């Protein structure tokens, strides 16, 4: 069924198709129609950052930036959903067009630039939550906030979303906000994580509820940078790491239509690189911090690959756009099978 629908959606401009799909999913859920389109997904609970996920397949941030359709998306069977990236003030993002399909490669290129309606709008949306799975809220800085003042934006967003989030992600790796990726390195990262950790502990004390914090990193990091980031994450007792965001390496796209567009590349071309980053992180982290694997998951095999590399759970985005809701089920089944296989293997 989705392949016919996809044909119609892919005939539209990508950003229009995106808004149309979110509106349709939101409406179907409000009208109680989701059960017509979905089959229940096997319960396969996984522990992550002290939370219990109904299954280890999540939706990555960026699809539902303003939490407009997360109840409907949740009804499709995701074990966890991450909304955002949200910034303190609303911002339009980069000029359109800013989202491109590279169909031959099973990829997307986007330079959205954290377009969102601001944290107050998102909070109003998540107040009315019907989704029973785990809800993550991804936060970032406004485009005009200097990098040295970025921590203020992250902390302000954390304070506002804290009562409604099951976990919070600090996005320091989008390639579409100038200077943002600098926050992944050296003193900038230490300063940011110190402020975020302080804020988290303050809020936990005030509300008597500990909300874990994850950091989302880029795929375009060398081994040394990955090791340094892992050490800083451990130093500040960050609860999780999401690997990875989109890549700025589009060398494999050069000959394809839209392949040279500015922005971050996601989808199949990212599969191998994100798995390598997960494996490198896992080697340095020694299971001290759980990893959520993202990048190029289009089927059960690519989902299992991330888990074997060292991830505890996975998130999908571009694969979901190309493959539709069936991918959630396919990935969840493959991961459940893999867990049974590895448990059986360990108990022998």
Image (cartoon, rainbow, N blue to C red):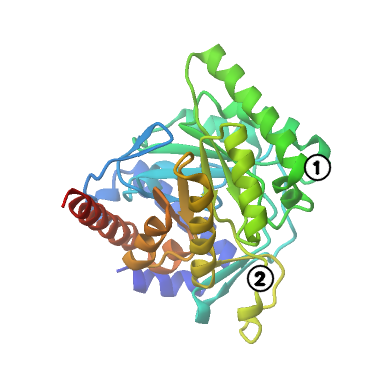
**What x and y, as percent, mark residue 226?**
62, 53
Residue 266 percent across, percent down from the top left: 56, 65
Q: Quadrant of residue 47?
A: top left
What residue appears at the point 37 percent right and 37 percent down from the top-left corner?
A: 131
Q: Mark 2: give few (<14), some (14-19) or many (20+) Cα within 10 Å.
A: some
Q: Are marks 1 and 2 in contact (CB under 8 Å)?
A: no
Q: Nearer the viewer, residue 302 or 127?
A: 302
Q: Position of residue 308 (x, y in %)?
A: 37, 58
- Compared with residue 124, is residue 276 higher up or lower down, i.e. above or below? below
Q: Residues within 10 Å of mark 1 (few under 14, many from 20)?
A: many
Q: How many numbered discs?
A: 2
Q: Position of residue 53 (x, y in %)?
A: 34, 39
Nearer-the-camera pick, 124 or 215: 215
Among numbered discs 1 and 2, the one appearing first in the sequence: 1
Could you give the CA–CA distance between mark 1 and mark 2, rounded to whole angstroms?
23 Å
**Looking at this view, is 132 or 52 the one in front?**
52
| Dot 2: element | loop
Which residue does the numbered mark 2 point to in the structure image? 249
Compared to residue 138, the image places residue 98 above or below, namely: below
Provide the residue designation for mark 1: 147
């Amino acid at each position: 069924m989705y392949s016919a629908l996809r044909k119609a959606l892919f005939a539209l401009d990508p950003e229009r198709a995106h808004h149309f799909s979110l509106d349709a999913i939101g409406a179907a859920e409000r009208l109680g129609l989701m059960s017509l389109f979905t089959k229940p997904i096997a319960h396969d609970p996984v522990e992550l950052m002290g939370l219990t996920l109904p299954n280890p397949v999540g939706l990555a941030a960026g699809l539902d930036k303003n939490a407009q359709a997360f109840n409907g998306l949740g009804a499709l069977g995701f074990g966890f959903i991450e909304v955002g990236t949200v910034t303190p003030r609303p911002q339009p993002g980069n000029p359109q067009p800013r989202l491109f399909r590279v169909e031959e490669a099973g990829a997307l290129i986007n330079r959205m630039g954290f377009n969102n309606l601001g944290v107050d709008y998102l909070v109003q949306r998540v107040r009315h939550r019907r989704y029973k799975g785990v809800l993550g809220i991804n936060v970032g800085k406004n485009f005009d906030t200097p990098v040295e003042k970025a921590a203020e934006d992250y902390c302000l967003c954390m304070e506002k979303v804290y009562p409604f989030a099951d976990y919070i992600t600090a996005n320091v790796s989008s390639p579409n906000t100038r200077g943002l990726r600098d926050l992944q390195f050296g003193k900038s990262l230490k300063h940011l994580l110190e402020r975020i950790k302080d804020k988290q502990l303050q809020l936990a004390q005030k509300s008597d509820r500990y909300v874990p914090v994850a950091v989302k990193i880029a795929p375009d990091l060398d081994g040394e940078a990955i090791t340094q980031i892992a050490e800083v994450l451990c130093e500040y007792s960050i609860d999780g790491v999401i690997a990875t965001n989109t890549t700025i390496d589009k060398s494999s796209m050069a000959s394809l239509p839209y392949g040279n567009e500015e922005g971050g590349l996601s989808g199949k071309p990212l599969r191998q690189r994100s798995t390598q980053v997960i494996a490198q992180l896992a080697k340095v982290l020694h299971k001290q911090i759980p990893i959520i694997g993202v990048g190029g998951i289009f089927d059960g095999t690519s989902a299992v690959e991330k888990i074997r590399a060292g991830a505890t759970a996975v998130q999908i985005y571009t694969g979901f756009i190309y493959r539709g809701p069936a991918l959630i089920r396919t990935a969840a089944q493959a991961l459940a099978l893999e867990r049974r296989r590895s448990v059986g293997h360990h108990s022998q």
